[in-house]
Image (cartoon, rainbow, N blue to C red):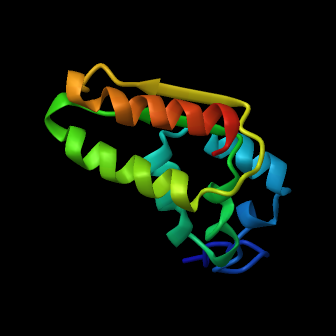
């Protein structure tokens, strides 16, 4: 039987991480913020990419609003002060008691503080 041809690049080569940072940010912009943060485990190059993403997509279900609040507080605290081109926040699952938090998140997205 003929042996199968192996890729000339060899195993373990990470071509995606070799892409420019702007292109990786563009790819991350299609993910929800939680998924984008989780990419930090993919490779060393991805470890801090989420920190400077120009797009944040945040959605939360009503039954997880406490987890969403905790995630958002940490996300905005750890995120760099880089430009934010788009901020998508679906707070449909929020309660009326979350209004102060949502206002704070929006203010942070708009003004960076």
Residue at x 61%, y 36% (from the top left corner):
109
User: Does 33 sit left or right of 50 as displayed?
Assistant: left
User: Does 47 sit left or right of 36 as displayed?
Assistant: right
> Can residue 25 be seen in the rendering of this structure?
yes
Q: Which of 31 and 9 lies nearest the eye of the viewer?
A: 31
User: Does 58 sit left or right of 77 as displayed?
Assistant: left
Compared to residue 23, the image places residue 93 above or below, namely above
Q: State the image coordinates of residue 42 (x, y, percent, origin top left).
A: 55, 69
Compared to residue 51, the image places residue 42 above or below, namely below
Q: How many marks?
A: 0
Residue at x 63%, y 45% (from the top left corner):
113
Tell me the quarter of the picture where residue 83 sits: top right
> Can residue 30 be seen in the rendering of this structure?
no
Tell me the quarter of the picture where residue 59 sits: top left
Tell me the quarter of the picture where residue 56 sits: top right
Q: Which of 102 and 57 lies nearest the eye of the viewer?
A: 102
Residue at x 53%, y 30% (from the top left corner):
106
Is the N terminus in the top left, top right, bottom left or bottom right quadrant?
Answer: bottom right
Residue at x 68%, y 57% (from the top left corner):
80
Q: Residue furthest left?
A: 63
Compared to residue 42, the image places residue 89 above or below, namely above
Q: State the image coordinates of residue 28 (x, y, percent, origin top left).
A: 62, 45
Q: State the image coordinates of residue 30 (x, y, percent, origin top left).
A: 59, 35
Q: Which of 95 and 51 lies nearest the eye of the viewer?
A: 95
Q: State the image coordinates of residue 38 (x, y, percent, origin top left).
A: 46, 60
């Amino acid at each position: 039987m003929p042996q199968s041809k192996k890729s000339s690049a060899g195993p373990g080569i990470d071509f995606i991480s070799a892409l420019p940072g702007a292109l990786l940010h563009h790819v991350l912009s299609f993910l929800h913020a939680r998924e984008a943060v989780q990419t930090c485990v993919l490779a060393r190059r991805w470890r801090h990419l989420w920190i400077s993403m120009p797009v944040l997509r945040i959605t939360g279900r009503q039954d997880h609003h406490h987890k969403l609040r905790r995630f958002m507080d940490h996300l905005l605290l750890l995120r760099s002060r880089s430009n934010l081109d788009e901020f998508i926040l679906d707070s449909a699952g929020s309660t009326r008691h979350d209004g102060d938090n949502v206002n704070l998140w929006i203010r942070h997205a708009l003004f960076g503080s």
